[in-house]
Image (cartoon, grey):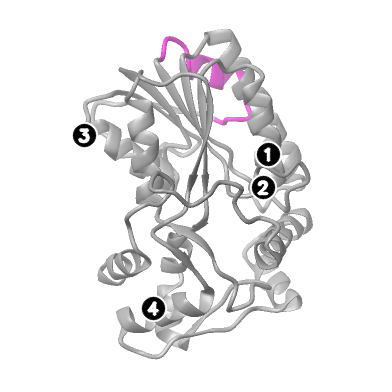
Amino acid sequence: MRIAIAGAGGRVGRALSRELAEAGAELVLMDRDVSRIDVPGADIREGALESPHYVVACTENIDALFWITPGGIDLADPLEFMDTLGVNVSASIAGNEIPRIVNVSAAGAHIPTAAGFVEGLHDNEERMDDFAGNIVHLRPGFFMDDIAGRMGAMRETGQLRFPLLRGDRAMPMVAIADIAYAAAQLLLSDQWEGHHILGLHGPTDLTPDEAAAIASEVLDRSVSYVPQDEAEARAELERIGASQAGANLLLDLYRGLDDGSLAPAEERTERTTTPTTLHDVLTQAADL
């Protein structure tokens, strides 16, 4: 089976590439920075997803496509960029008659006016549906790996921090490894048809306060959750190169998480519940 992976150098793409390579799939790996890719035997193609010719060329004669739409907080207009990518992939789906597509979206993408970057994901879900015969949109919750990425800061300061999000807001949290596994199972199968949505919710909903308590166990030191106010969050985003539009979208996303407007539409079921715990993810990060 020949499978193309957009964003193969990203966090989800790298995990998925490993899953599919181990399963023996023939891979076409797409990324603007192929130095991040290490998959022996894969057809690795460097290029930009905003180039329609690149996307079309990489998706010719494939059996399945994995698609993920990056936002890019450094861009002057991230939603316009996401829209361009949605147009490119939709044209490729139609022109190359791609049999099956798995698209990573996000919890809350059912809302036409979804908050922040999720608005762009909603629009691309609808756009791809217009051209795809068989597609699954994965709608994961908050990435556990974003908490793992703060292990150094938590070890140093004893604080876990996110913008605007209050400590008692419970929400689904999922490991990137489980997103990759779910995508791999769908991409490797030809036993499904039609348009589907699959929420990915982790083992249980967690609050930031509970996440900090789990980090305390893993790090063997006290960690507390302290939300960033808007001014502090904006200053940090500016420091790491976010544009004004990018910062606005990211903060809107956190507001949506905080007020519950980005809560998943999909119920927690046996299928949407994934196995990897936050303790597992943080333990692995601490050991690196």
The residue to which callout 4 is attached is 215
What's the distance in space between the residues labelled 3 and 1, CA to CA? 32 Å
* Residue stretch rendered in magenta on the structure: 48-62
Q: Position of residue 172 (x, y in %)?
A: 50, 60
What's the distance in space between the residues labelled 4 and 1, CA to CA? 32 Å
Is the Cβ of the residue at disc 2 closer than 8 Å to that at disc 4? no
Q: Please tell me which of labels 4 and 3 falls first in the chain.
A: 3
The residue to which callout 2 is attached is 118
Q: Please tell me which of labels 4 and 1 falls first in the chain.
A: 1
What's the distance in space between the residues labelled 2 and 4, CA to CA? 27 Å
14 sits left or right of 97 in the view = left
Identify residue type, mark 1.
His
Q: Secondary structure at mark 1?
A: helix
Q: Position of residue 53 (x, y in %)?
A: 59, 17
For label 4, the crowd category at 10 Å Cα-Cα, with few meaning under 14, some 14 to 19 and many 20 or more, is many
214 sits left or right of 83 in the view = left
Q: Position of residue 257 (x, y in %)?
A: 65, 62
For label 1, the crowd category at 10 Å Cα-Cα, with few meaning under 14, some 14 to 19 and many 20 or more, is many
Quadrant in which the N terminus is drawn: top left
Quadrant in which the C terminus is drawn: bottom left
**Residue 65 is inside the magenta segment:** no
The residue to which callout 1 is attached is 122
Q: Please tell me which of labels 3 and 2 falls first in the chain.
A: 3
